[in-house]
Every structure is written in structure tokens, then in C-alpha cells.
Amino acid sequence: MLDSFARCFPPLPLPREMHLWDAHAMSLGLPEEILMENAAHAALDVLKTYCPHLTGQNILLLMGGGNNGGDAVCLARLLLDAGARPQVLHTHPLSHYKGASGKHVRIARSCGVPFQRYTADLQKYQPDILIDGLLGTGFHGALRPDMLQLIRAVNALNVPLVLALDIPSGLHGVSGKPMPDAVQATATVTFQAAKPGLLMPDAAFRTGHVHVRDIGIPAQTRSEAPCSVYLADGHCLYPLTQCKPQAFKNSYGHVLIVGGVCGLGGAAHLAARAAVRSGAGLVTAAAPASGLPDIKNGWAEIMTFALPSDTGNKWPEVLSREFITRVQRSTSLVVGPGMGRSEDALAFLAALLDVPHRPPTVFDADALMLLAQSPRLLARITAKDVLTPHPGEAAALLGCRASDVQLERMEALQRLCALIPGVVVLKGAGTLVGQKQAPALLCPYDIPQLSIAGAGDVLAGCLGGLLARNTVAEQDDATAHAILRHAGQAVALHALAGKHLGKHWPMRGNTPSELADSLPVALAAYALQLPTEDTLPWPR
């Protein structure tokens, strides 16, 4: 099952996992020198996209003490052959370099590449291009004072083109944070697969455009050493473009939206609207009667079900047989948008969680806050359910501050996943999706058009729609990683719908209704296009 999951989402190996890939490839008989040579050729290929004519270019290559430095010195030899004027500054004595790096140092020197030991004064070089080969993805902890000084000297040079090898030096390979500073690159060429830290939104200022290049790690290695993190971007949407032959409305599932008391019906409307736009065959909204007009909001496509209530605006504590039947016949549920946080809402939620044979359920917004205040209800979440907290709701579930969640988002995701057997979508720039004992997904986008009230309701409805249509298609909602996969697809589609809106509303000002309506447009725009170098986030 993991193989099919990995085919949908490109791998984002952690630094230790990338080290295992290298080691496994070498155990198969692939020499480290060849991998280094391949990395250098990949870097040269990227460099030529920015500077096609390298002849006569003054290129300063910074060579650190690890394999990243070996990539740099190998590249220096290729640059010399291309007619450029490379200069290698090494941070360690040349006698320090052993193994593959040492071999490439000897080859480069024999070919005439000039080497010089690094000194504090970089200003005298005035290069046209700078290659950062100081620190690789294995770097962790805080920079040593001498390396911090060197990195800040690099940034002060204002070189027109800075290419980082694998990762800008000083950037953390997992969190994407500078430690406490990092090389500010024009572009980064990363080898075999992107690393999580490169795609975190905060890292973009340091990485520039990230290019992923194959260096020959065998497919057997990648399949035998699966990653902890995978990428959820537009390419995971391709399966959603496959329309079923001879289909009818029930072929795409029935979503039941539960939420929208009087005064909060707009949230449930947005969720229902998004479920329609994401391709569900039928959508029904259930709420106390007084909230239904706002939920429907002129959309004949949204069916409604009035929950019996003494006042018409309270959630019933006892579920009617008719409502239970509707729940059980639905393909997915979305619970929480506009639900409110009253005592009657809490009692209703408790009763809903007890419904036998409940379909996969998305818990969002007010439902999350109700779950946070009642651990006994949280314990009823199943492996088929999805929680979609923003940082504030995540903080309520974890009993901490939202700032703590944002400080260590990957750790926060792991703590949330430990609470339940279901899937967790930790919303925000660089949304994370995870599940206990399963890989995490990283959606790399930071979309200003999503920073608007109601965007989360749209995501909940989109996820409900994808759960409905995919559960029907698979006829097996217990498939390993299936719910996780659908959640990742919904997050990617939602983000790309926001990105599409940026073309029409570049300075924001869009509405969440427009976001919902952009879902099928984004699917067509991003999932049906042929892969290109600009869009493909893993090696061709």
C-alpha cells in the first residue's frame, strides 16, 4: 500500500534518510565518486539555465569539510572544462579530505583547478557567480562562530548569482529555519529529492528557486527505504481527473454537512458549496431549522435537513431515527462549520459520535473546540476520521499556545497524531498532514488569498467531497493510508485554488465563495497540465 501512496506523493527524505539512500546505493555497488560526479553534472546543468555562457566567468566555489564540499570541487573541474575561471576556497586543509571528496580534490588539482585556503576577506574576489558547498543537509544545531561569520560575509558580497548545492548552508534540513543565519541563494539544486526544510515557506527567502535533479540513486533503494515525509502539491491531483465511465450521481458519493446554526450559516454554506465544487455527487446540509436559509443561500444544489428542535435553533440531544439513517447512508460527513460551542452543540456532537457505522468524518472549526474541551469525545475518533485544526485549534487540543504550535509545526503535528488514530491536517502556510504510524505530507504553498475567514470551511467541504467520491471509487475506506492520501489531495487542491485566485486578485480581496468556486478550475489548470521543469518537484 505504501508503494501506491508514494507514487501519488514525491518523497521528501529527512537528512538521515538521504544518508541511508546514499549508503544503500553504495552497498549495491554504486561508487560514491560516481554519485558525486552525477551531483556535479546536475549542478552544472542548473547553473547553465541561469548563465548559458560560462566562458570567462569568475566563479568562486566555497568548499566545506563534508561531501557537500566534494560536490563543489567536482563542479569546479567541470566549470574549468566549460571555459569558466573557477577558484575553490576550502575551509579545511586539503589533507583533511578523504574518500570520494579527496579523490575529486586530487583529480581537480591535476586538471589545473586553483585552490586556496579560506581567509576572512572575501571582498577581494568579486566573483560573477558563487557556489555554496559549505554545509549539506546533515548540518544540525547552531552554526559555529567561524562558519556564521563566513556565511554572513557571503551574503554581504551581493554576488549576482549564488547557487547552493543541496541546501543553503546554515539552513536546517527539516524545519527550514536558519541556524541562526544561512546563505541567501539565488537558486538551490538539491540532489535526487527535495528535503522538507527546502519547501517550508520560511525557507524560500534563502533557497531561491529549488531545482531537484536525479543523481542515480536506484529505484530499489528508494522503495526499500521509504521516507517519513512526502510532498503534497499539484501532481498528487492527477487521479482526481479520471472520470468514471457510465457514472451517475451516486458514483461520486453523498456528503452530509452538519453545522450552521442561525447566524453562523455562512460557514456551513461554504463547506457545502466546496463539497459540490470538489465533485461530490450529492450534498445535504443538516442543522436546526432556523439556520437552513443561510446555509442554502440560494443554492438549489444544496439539499437540507431540518433537525428537530424545541426552539428551531438548538441542536437536539437525542438523534432521530431519520437523521441516523441519513448519516449511515452518507459517504462522508463534515461536522463543525458554524456549529457553535453551546452545551446543546456538545451534547449533539457526543450523540453523533456514537452513531454506529458512521462514515469517514471531517471535524472542523467549532467541532474541534468542543472535542478539545472533552477528552472523552476525542477518544471516539476513529482511523477513518480527519481533524483539521488551525494553530489556535491545535493549541486547544494540545493544551499549549498557538505560538508554540507555530514554532515547531512538525513536532506539533506528531503530538496531535498521538492523540487520535485518525488523520490530522495542521493548517497554515506549509500545511502538514499526518497520521499515527504513517508518513507525513507537506503542502509547500504559502498563499495570501487563503488568509480569509471561511477558507477553512472551504477546505473542510473540499475534503468531505474527496472522501465521498474516493470512498465510493475504492469501495474500501479502510485501505492503508487512503484517508491520509485524500486529505493530502484536498489540501493541495485547496491551496492551488487560492493560487489560481491570485491571478485575478493579486493583492487579495477575494471571497471564500470564490475560493470554493475555483476548486474545479484549479484541478483542470494544475492536474491536467503536462509536467515541466518549473512544475515538476522531483527528478524526471
Image (cartoon, rainbow, N blue to C red):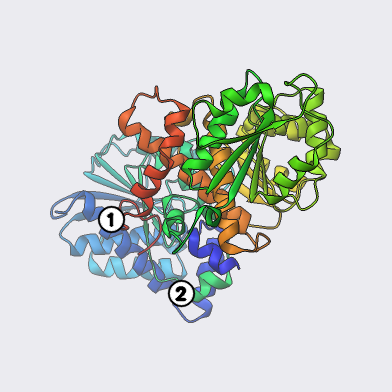
The vertical placement of 538 against 314, above or below, is below
Q: Is residue 390 left or right of residue 490?
A: right
Report the Cα–Cα distance between label 1 and label 2. Answer: 22 Å
Q: Is residue 199 left or right of residue 484?
A: left
Residue drawn where x is 50% and y is 68% of the image: 22
Kind of residue at disc 2: Pro
Question: Can the viewer see residue 224?
Answer: yes
Disc 1 to disc 2: CB gap under 8 Å: no
Local secondary structure at mark 2? loop
Residue drawn where x is 66% and y is 48% of the image: 330
Residue 399 image offset from top left, x and y in percent: 77, 31
Q: Is residue 414 left or right of residue 60?
A: right
Labelled disc at residue 228? none
The vertical placement of 312 against 233, above or below, is above
Identify residue for label 2.
Answer: 218
Residue drawn where x is 84% and y is 34% of the image: 318
Q: Nearer the viewer, residue 120 or 256?
A: 256
Q: Is residue 101 left or right of residue 454?
A: left
Q: Nearer the viewer, residue 176 or 415?
A: 415
Q: Residues within 10 Å of mark 2 (few under 14, many from 20)?
A: some
The vertical placement of 372 against 130, above or below, is above
Q: Nearer the viewer, residue 497 or 506?
A: 497
Question: Can the viewer see residue 132?
Answer: no
Quadrant, the N terminus: bottom right
Q: Nearer the viewer, residue 419 or 107?
A: 419
Identify residue for label 1.
Answer: 46
